[in-house]
Image (tube, rainbow, N blue to C red):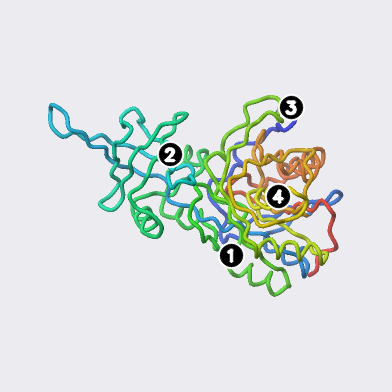
Amino acid sequence: MKLSDFDFDLPEDLIATRPASPRSAARLLVATPELLSDGKVTDLVDWLQPGDRLVLNDTKVIPARLSGLRHRDTAQGKMAAKIEVTLLDPKADGCWSALLKPLKKVKTGETVVFSDALSAELEAVEDGQGLLRFNLKGDDFDKALNAAGAMPLPPYIAAKRAADAHGMEDYQTVWARHSGAVAAPTASLHFDQALLAALADKGVQFTHVTLHVGAGTFLPVKVEDVTSHKMHAEWGRASPEAAVEIAATKAAGGRVMPVGTTALRLIESAARKGQIEPWEGETDIFIYPGFTFHAADALMTNFHLPKSTLLMLISALMGQDRVRAIYDHAIEHRYRFFSYGDASLLLPQGANTPQK
């Protein structure tokens, strides 16, 4: 299976740099093995059925971009150096992996001060990344980080425009709960409270899981043999309650539909033995064609970039030929791509006539 199998020509102007407003006004392409239907995200109410269960990733994006100072005594007196930090992933021992610029300006054991309340010590350097231990934990850390940090825009957006005040709201889901992500579960950004209420009135049920999306989600695949690609690890949790709810929906004949590839990867990590179980830990699950799904029956997701692991994941769900047809249609009809782009609802088992 070659990387070139997942390549296609994507016009640059189809990559969105701003979200739709309101969120649920984004376009929605519904795809089954035989059908392609153009609509809007609000049409989910018509396509979903009573007893369906949406699985929602309740990770909360942190303001992961920090600017601080490293102080050092020298023969010329006390000297300071400006250090830019981008937090990447929380570690089990409480440290954060981070990019430090310039890394060579900080020695192991030195402290970088970000504000009167927030600082971090560089404990180690591994693979060009620093391991930082902050002076605060829990709610105190969250409060100080929110005051000192800036929201991390995806790299391709940051290259096109500067971050602004809208990002703190635009790049956060309405159900965000557990802090730890440095990138948003972007399919979830299409939901607002009005849409959630309409779906609940329809009889659609909701389950929350957590997968802290890391910066590795933007890493390109660099090997031509796709199967040799090493996925980045991300921390996640499917609670006992979540496992029970998902299992009950499947037993009752309902459809389990993750919102976003992160939620799908989490529940499939929790179902590797063949059925969903409570699960917590780091997952580096890599889903590509040939994968056997044990938990997800369908998927709502955005449109992904060429040669990405996310494109490989949806190809595993729908089939490579079908995904090519879906994406040809999306490009021809000028759907917007990637984090702030439009959405697709992928139904590999087919669909009943939408219920208006």
Give the mark nearest the N terminus, 2 or 4.
2
Amino acid under label 2? Ala
User: Which-is-in-front pick, marks 3 and 4?
Assistant: 4
Name the quadrant containing residue 13: top right
Q: CA distance from mark 2 to mark 4?
A: 28 Å
Name of the residue lying farthest toward the bottom: 201
Relative image position of residue 344 (x, y in whole percent):
71, 51
Q: Viewer-proximal residue, 159 or 75?
A: 75
Q: CA distance from mark 1 to mark 4?
A: 26 Å
Amino acid under label 3? Lys
* Label 3 Cα neighbours within 10 Å, binned few <14 / some 14-19 / many ≥20: few
Q: CA distance from mark 3 to mark 4?
A: 24 Å
Residue annotated with mark 3: 2
The image shows residue 355, relative to residue 350, as above or below, that is below
Residue annotated with mark 2: 98
Local SS, label 1:
loop
Give the mark nearest the N terminus, 3 or 2.
3
Amino acid under label 4? Glu
User: Which-is-in-front pick, marks 1 and 3?
Assistant: 3
Which numbered marker is on residue 192? 1
Q: CA distance from mark 1 to mark 2?
A: 32 Å
The image shows residue 201, relative to residue 28, as above or below, that is below
